[in-house]
């Protein structure tokens, strides 16, 4: 799950990136309203973690512009201004959730997972497809109810495919989910991760749609 973080405090921003990576997210960092606008135009993000006090403007004004422009991406506000009135103002301007500083990183991760469930139209925390199950809270995968050990990238790849159960997910979209702006992507990196997943889950579980991307498919008994 690729997340845009808009936070200008370097210490807090670095902690957010490190903490969300440990929780299985792929966080990208910007520190200004202008950079956040550019990132949303050019990137494929599942949610935004937005600070309210930025060097070149207000996060609330930025959020208001996004909503007026028709951007429906989920947004969690982070701010030291944590009165009831501040929370109401943020939510009424289009925020999906609100966390006051200081906050717990595990709680932020849980709120992001809850947003993802709502976006995907599911209530159950565990994602399921055929014999596969994925528990985002514990970052664990299962096949036929037995745990399967996955690397961080393998887990992220499987999660991206399970978010579109049975749908074809474009190669570029999967690479966005796996790699951040600062990471180079080798030409065959995605194929290597797909190969490793097939070795652990079954060769027939992931179908290659040549020239397009990949698709999860249920195993034939």
Image (cartoon, rainbow, N blue to C red):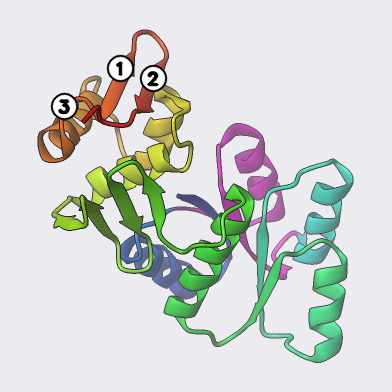
Which residue was labeled with disc 3?
Answer: 203
* Mark 3, secondary structure of its residue: loop
Distance (Cα) linking label 3 and label 1: 11 Å
| Location of residue 71 (image quadrant) | top right
Which residue was labeled with disc 1?
Answer: 208
Residue 54 seen in this snapshot: yes
Which residue was labeled with disc 2?
Answer: 213
Q: Position of residue 143 (x, y in %)?
A: 21, 49
Residue lying farthest bottom?
83
In the image shown, does 104 or 181 lie closer to the viewer?
104
Q: Position of residue 62 (x, y in %)?
A: 79, 56
| Location of residue 27 (image quadrant) | bottom left
* Mark 2, secondary structure of its residue: strand
Q: Position of residue 129 (x, y in %)?
A: 37, 43
Q: Is residue 193 magenta?
A: no
Neighbor class of circle 3 (other Cα within 10 Å; few <14, some 14-19, many 20+) is: some
Residue lying farthest left?
199
Tell me which segment is drawn in magenta.
Answer: 27-56
Residue 86, compared with residue 127, is above or below; it is: below
**Placement of the C terminus among the 4 image quadrants:** top left
Residue found at x 18% / y 50%: 151
Residue lying farthest top?
211
In the image shown, does 201 or 112 lie closer to the viewer?
201
| Location of residue 168 (image quadrant) | top left
Neighbor class of circle 2 (other Cα within 10 Å; few <14, some 14-19, many 20+) is: some
Cβ atoms under marks 3 and 1 closer than 8 Å: no
Residue 179 seen in this snapshot: no
Q: Is residue 38 magenta?
A: yes
Neighbor class of circle 1 (other Cα within 10 Å; few <14, some 14-19, many 20+) is: some
Residue found at x 16% / y 58%: 147
């Amino acid at each position: 799950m690729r997340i845009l973080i808009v936070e200008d405090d370097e210490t807090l921003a670095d902690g957010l990136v490190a903490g969300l990576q440990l929780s299985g997210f792929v966080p990208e960092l910007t520190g200004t309203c202008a950079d956040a606008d550019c990132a949303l135009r050019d990137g494929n993000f599942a949610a935004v973690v937005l600070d309210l006090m930025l060097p070149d403007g207000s996060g609330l004004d930025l959020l208001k512009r996004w909503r007026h422009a028709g951007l429906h991406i989920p947004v969690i506000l982070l701010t030291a201004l944590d009165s009831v009135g501040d929370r109401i103002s943020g939510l009424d301007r289009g925020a999906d959730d609100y966390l006051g500083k200081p906050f717990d990183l595990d709680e932020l991760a849980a709120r992001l997972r809850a947003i993802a469930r709502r976006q995907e139209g599911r209530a159950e925390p565990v994602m399921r497809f055929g014999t596969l199950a994925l528990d985002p809270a514990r970052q664990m995968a299962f096949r036929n109810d037995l745990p399967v050990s996955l690397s961080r990238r393998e887990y992220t790849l499987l999660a991206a495919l399970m978010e579109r159960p049975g749908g074809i997910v474009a190669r570029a979209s999967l690479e966005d989910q796996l790699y951040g702006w600062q990471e180079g992507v080798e030409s065959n990196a995605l194929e290597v991760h797909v190969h490793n997943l097939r070795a652990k889950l079954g060769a027939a579980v992931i179908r290659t749609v040549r020239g397009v991307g990949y698709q999860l498919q249920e195993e034939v008994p």
